[in-house]
């Protein structure tokens, strides 16, 4: 399917992780121009044959930033647009931190809570704010009918934790719920003031086959909890999430879709917990 994303500049945060890398590859496959953000290492991007070829053709730029720092976020957008040669008009907010060690709320440290909310929520705010500010600048200089403005969209990466909650990970669940509900629903009404056809949507995965998930799934208790209410009885592949991101980013396919949360969870009906299971030695 032609998503009409050729030469659209897409910036993806957290692009060196499992879902992020799959999303980079997906957009490159649709002939988009991609800026791939990373915080500490870009090894996965460099090791990808697809990414290496795209970089040689100047269709991929790797940009480093700590998204919790205003100056880093501003520099990231500037570098991305200088390297690619045109404004970012599609933004995928994918970065996040998740503490794999369960911590009930009554024992969770303030430092853990603050780190998760600062990265997942405040970091997303800073990235979104800069995207909107630069969009406003392009509108002022080029007008909304510019070829650069033909496809304007934001796709947030949420989580089933933001829908159902997740015992032992209230910090992560709270950050994702705030991002994909209160923030998304506010933003989808604001962004149209900058571009009347700009859209904001969310893809919310459940368990996805990443390195961290595969390690967790070795624990039969975790695997049982993850699949207990999942109709398809499997976890998602990163590529399955990435395809949904590209579909929502495409005006051709999703031009009248905004403010929606698309769940990629195999039919999950909620987080299943049992005291006997979760506390078994």
Image (tube, helix red, strand yellow):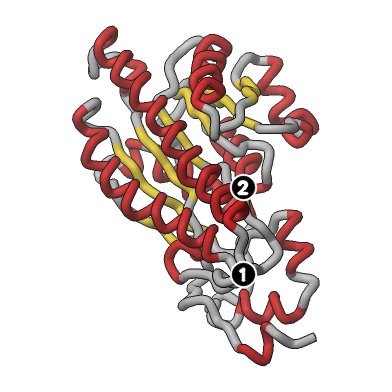
| Quarter of the image with the C terminus in it | bottom right
Q: Residues within 10 Å of mark 1 (few under 14, many from 20)?
A: few
**Is 76 above or below relative to 181?**
above
In this picture, residue 210 sits left or right of residue 270? right
* Total tally of numbered discs in the picture: 2
Please report the residue visible at 35 percent of the width from the left and 28 percent of the height from the top.
Answer: 151
Foreground residue among 8 and 184:
184
**Is 194 above or below relative to 112?**
above
Measuring from the top left, give residue 175's x and y in whole percent: 47, 54
Using the rendered view, name the quadrant where residue 217 is placed. bottom right
Dot 1 or dot 2: first in sequence order is: 2
Measuring from the top left, give residue 200's x and y in whole percent: 33, 42
Foreground residue among 87 and 119:
119
How far, Cα to Cα, is label 1 from label 2?
A: 30 Å
Measuring from the top left, give residue 5's x and y in whole percent: 44, 29
Q: Nearer the viewer, mark 1 or mark 2?
A: 1
Q: Label 2, on which residue? A: 19
Q: Residues within 10 Å of mark 2 (few under 14, many from 20)?
A: many
Measuring from the top left, give residue 52's x and y in whole percent: 74, 24
Please report the residue visible at 78 percent of the width from the left and 63 percent of the height from the top.
Answer: 215
**Is 179 above or below relative to 213?**
above
In this picture, residue 264 sits left or right of residue 152? right
Using the rendered view, name the quadrant where residue 99 is placed. bottom right
**Is 156 above or below relative to 159?**
above
Please report the residue visible at 55 percent of the width from the left and 49 percent of the height from the top.
Answer: 114
Q: Label 1, on which residue? A: 107
User: Is the Cβ of the residue at disc 1 closer than 8 Å to that at disc 2?
Assistant: no
């Amino acid at each position: 399917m032609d998503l009409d994303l050729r030469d659209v500049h897409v910036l993806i945060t957290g692009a060196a992780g499992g879902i992020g890398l799959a999303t980079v590859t997906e957009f490159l496959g649709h002939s988009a121009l991609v800026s791939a953000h990373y915080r500490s290492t870009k090894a996965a991007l460099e090791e990808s044959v697809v990414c290496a070829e795209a970089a040689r053709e100047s269709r991929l730029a790797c940009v480093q930033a700590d998204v919790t720092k205003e100056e880093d976020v501003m520099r990231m957008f500037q570098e991305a647009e200088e390297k690619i040669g045109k404004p970012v008009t599609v933004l995928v907010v994918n970065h996040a931190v998740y503490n794999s060690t369960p911590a009930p709320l009554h024992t969770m440290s303030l430092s853990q809570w603050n780190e998760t909310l600062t990265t997942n929520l405040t970091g997303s705010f800073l990235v979104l704010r800069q995207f909107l500010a630069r969009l406003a600048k392009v509108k002022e200089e080029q007008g909304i009918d510019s070829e650069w403005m033909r496809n304007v969209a934001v796709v947030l990466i949420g989580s089933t934790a933001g829908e159902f909650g997740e015992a032992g990970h209230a910090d992560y669940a709270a950050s994702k719920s705030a991002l994909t509900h209160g923030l998304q629903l506010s933003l989808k009404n604001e962004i149209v003031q900058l571009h009347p056809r700009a859209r904001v949507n969310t893809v919310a995965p459940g368990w996805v086959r990443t390195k961290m998930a595969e390690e967790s799934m070795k624990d039969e208790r975790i695997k049982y909890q993850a699949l207990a209410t999942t109709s398809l009885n499997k976890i998602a592949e990163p590529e399955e999430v990435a395809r949904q991101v590209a579909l929502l980013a495409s005006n051709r396919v999703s031009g009248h879709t905004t403010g929606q949360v698309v769940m990629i969870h195999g039919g999950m009906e909620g987080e299943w917990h049992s005291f006997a299971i979760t506390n078994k030695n």
